[in-house]
Image (spheres, helix red, strand yellow):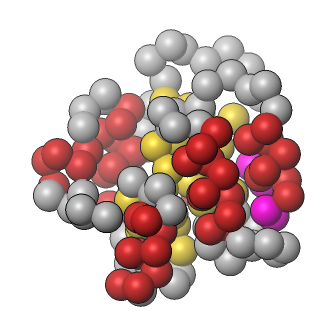
Amino acid sequence: MDSHVSPSTLTCFLVEDNPVIRENLVATLEEMVDLRVLGHAVDEEGALTWLTQDNRPCDLLIIDIFLSQGTGLNVLQAASARMPSARRVILSNYATPDMRQRCMALGAHRVFDKSAELEDLLAYCQCLAERQEPDAADGNAGPY
């Protein structure tokens, strides 16, 4: 794996416990967007450990809510405090209106449904990679 990342390349950390979803998502994102996945965690503890290490800056965190152990909600809350400049996105099969509101209250910038909104996630990541403000254009930034 090439450790050199162009200064313009969007960097991402992924919190997802399903290996098939994780591998497909990494492949799709890196193929479709000027994006490099720096690493991943499969559970809350692994994600929190990564967040507390002295890492190079990360532009984007993509977090699943239900993990093999723990919850992405705790990861989201910790990421909001420890990486305030990173975009925090939830990607979940449980993107109900209540869960979306809860995630936004914990510091998510956006919430995407795995089964129905992958194209929207890709478009969002593309905007970030082009250094555009994705929430300004689509009116989907809630007041939460």
| 123 on left or right of 86 | left
User: Which quarter of the rendering shows the N terminus?
Assistant: top right
- Residue 2 at x, y percent in the picture: 73, 22
| 73 on left or right of 48 | left
Is residue 24 in sight in this rendering? Answer: no
- Residue 71 at x, y percent in the picture: 71, 72
Q: Is residue 137 above or below residue 91?
A: above
Is residue 64 in sight in this rendering? Answer: yes
| 139 on left or right of 115 | left
Q: Which residue is drawn at 49% across and 24% down?
A: 9
| 43 on left or right of 91 | right
Q: Give the range drawn in magenta.
A: 40-44
Looking at this view, is 43 or 8 the one in front?
43
Q: In this view, does 75 lie above or below 20?
A: above
Q: In this view, does 116 lie above or below 55?
A: below
Q: Residue 72's image quarter?
A: bottom right
